[in-house]
């Protein structure tokens, strides 16, 4: 039996593909049990299987959803107004594919493609509204709203493109052409109908759907086009190129669109802070606590501070103000960020911290990443040498050997500068300047 996912030929009496593990056979319409292809009756409930029972391969076409209790799922009211982001993604070259291949082969390919898309959308907590031919419509914020739904939609679109590109490389010899996606994204106010999260029915209506669909049709293979609202909500996370406004049917004025170029290597969560802003008011006690903790760190006592509060209470703004204060004290600021869409990634704060510290970008090849890590290791070794020379300088200074102390401080300053530690190099230079004012005092040799 041919596997619908990887096209591997399996023996007849198998429930799962020997190559990729895909479920085989037919699903009982009564109890949803997967049965062997040659079964006439369901092995679980005894129901008579017929050709109307859907093949297990059709499970690939169903939108992925968490395995949760239906009663625990969020239910939206009829006609509820929501601020959501709509993603349309279309397969390039689908018409040519239908002309070249048998309809059953086309169905198997689109099933695997839609399965990849559903996996990505579910990963970022979006929802598949519908599949239509070679296109898919996904909604972010219709069932569960997030503050970064626009960002999630763009990241999901980028990952969909990457997965289909990888899929194309694997199967383009078999299908005789290259497969790619093009996507359109728009954010705005929508109205939901009777939302059934388990069955996958929404009945969403609103202008963002029309504009997102139009942007998808304008996008070339591999491109992701977004509207002005999506651009505004994701500014600071991605690099964009502004394109000429386009006329959309049903919209009076031309719509400004942007093309997503790349993800910023070090995205800023506080992307709303730009231009003029008001003074921070009512947070002096919190700033004093943070400043006191910083002074204790300077005295050699480490501190851990947790800032907790509801959304919109000014946590990020407080951190930003403290960051400005700490820079005045010549503090080396290192930060690693958590993102709402990265909750399923292990050690993401540590990974983000290391990437920012070492200057590792998302698109850096493995060879360049290794080079950056090695360079940082060498800088770390130089920092160790700088501290060692500083300690030896203090030792010789206490012993009264000013010449050796001056030489050690000189080496320490040189190594600190190579590491980019200007504050520490200036501290050692201050000690070195104090030695210049002292007379050379070498230890006296005792005669025997």
Image (cartoon, helix red, strand yellow):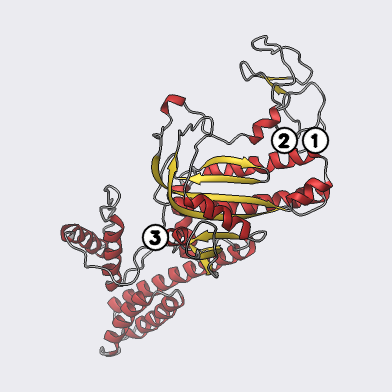
- Between the residue at mark 1 and the residue at mark 3, the CA separation in whole angstroms equals 47 Å
Q: Which mark is residue 97?
A: none
Q: Position of residue 283 (x, y in %)?
A: 18, 59
Q: In this view, does 9 lie to the left or right of 388?
A: right
The structure residue drawn at horizontal position 46% and vertical position 54%, both measured from the top left corner, is 187
- 332 up-or-down from 337: above or below: below
Whether residue 341 is visible? yes
- 5 up-or-down from 298: above or below: above
**Is there CB contact under 8 Å for labels 1 and 2?**
yes
Q: Residue 8 carries which label?
A: 1
Mark 3 sits on what residue? Answer: 335
- Between the residue at mark 1 and the residue at mark 2, the CA separation in whole angstroms equals 8 Å
Q: Is residue 55 left or right of residue 323?
A: right
Q: Residue furthest top?
A: 46
Q: How crowded is mark 3: few (under 14 residues within 10 Å), some or many (20 or more)?
A: few
Q: SS of the residue at dot 1?
A: loop
Q: How crowded is mark 2: few (under 14 residues within 10 Å), some or many (20 or more)?
A: few
Q: Nearer the viewer, residue 216 or 427?
A: 216
Which one is closest to the eye, mark 1 or mark 3? Answer: 1
The structure residue drawn at horizontal position 35% and vertical position 72%, both measured from the top left corner, is 391
Q: SS of the residue at dot 2?
A: loop
Q: Position of residue 228 (x, y in %)?
A: 46, 62
The structure residue drawn at horizontal position 45% and vertical position 42%, both measured from the top left corner, is 142
Q: In which quarter of the image is residue 60?
A: top right
């Amino acid at each position: 039996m041919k596997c619908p996912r990887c096209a591997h030929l399996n023996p007849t009496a198998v429930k799962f593909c020997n190559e990729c593990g895909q479920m085989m056979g037919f699903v009982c319409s009564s109890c949803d049990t997967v049965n062997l292809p040659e079964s006439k009756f369901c092995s679980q409930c005894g129901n008579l299987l017929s050709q109307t029972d859907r093949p297990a391969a059709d499970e690939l076409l169903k939108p992925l959803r968490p395995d949760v209790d239906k009663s625990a799922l969020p239910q939206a009211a009829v006609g509820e107004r929501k601020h959501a982001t709509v993603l349309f993604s279309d397969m390039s070259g689908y018409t040519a594919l239908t002309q070249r291949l048998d309809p059953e082969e086309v169905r198997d390919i689109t099933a695997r493609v839609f399965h990849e898309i559903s996996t990505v959308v579910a990963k970022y907590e979006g929802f598949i509204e519908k599949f239509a031919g070679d296109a898919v419509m996904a909604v972010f914020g219709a069932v569960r709203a997030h503050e970064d739904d626009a960002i999630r939609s763009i990241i999901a679109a980028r990952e969909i493109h990457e997965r289909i590109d990888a899929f194309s490389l694997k199967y383009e010899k078999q299908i005789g052409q290259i497969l790619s996606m093009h996507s359109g994204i728009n954010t705005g106010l929508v109205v939901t109908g009777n939302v059934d999260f388990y069955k996958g029915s929404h009945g969403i209506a609103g202008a963002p759907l029309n504009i997102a669909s139009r942007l998808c049709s304008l996008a070339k293979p591999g491109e992701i086009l977004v509207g002005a609202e999506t651009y505004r909500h994701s500014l600071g996370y991605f690099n964009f190129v502004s394109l000429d406004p386009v006329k959309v049917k049903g919209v009076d004025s031309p719509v400004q669109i942007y093309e997503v170029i790349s993800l910023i290597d070090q995205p800023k969560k506080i992307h709303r802070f730009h231009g003029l802003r008001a003074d921070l008011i009512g947070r002096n006690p919190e700033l004093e606590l943070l400043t006191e903790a910083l002074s204790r760190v300077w005295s050699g006592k480490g501190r851990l501070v947790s800032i907790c509060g509801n959304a919109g209470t000014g946590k990020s703004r407080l951190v930003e103000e403290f960051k400005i204060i700490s820079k005045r004290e010549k503090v080396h600021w290192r930060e690693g960020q958590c993102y709402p869409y990265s909750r399923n990634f292990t050690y993401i704060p540590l990974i983000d911290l290391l990437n920012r510290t070492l200057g590792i970008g998302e698109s850096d090849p493995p060879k360049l990443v290794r080079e950056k890590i090695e360079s940082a290791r060498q800088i770390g070794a130089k920092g160790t040498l700088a501290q060692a020379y500083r300690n030896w300088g203090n030792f010789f200074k206490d012993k009264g050997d000013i010449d050796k102390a001056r030489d050690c401080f000189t080496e320490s300053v040189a190594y600190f500068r190579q590491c980019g530690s200007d504050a520490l190099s200036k501290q050692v230079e201050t000690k070195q300047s104090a030695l210049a004012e002292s007379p050379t005092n070498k230890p006296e040799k005792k005669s025997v």
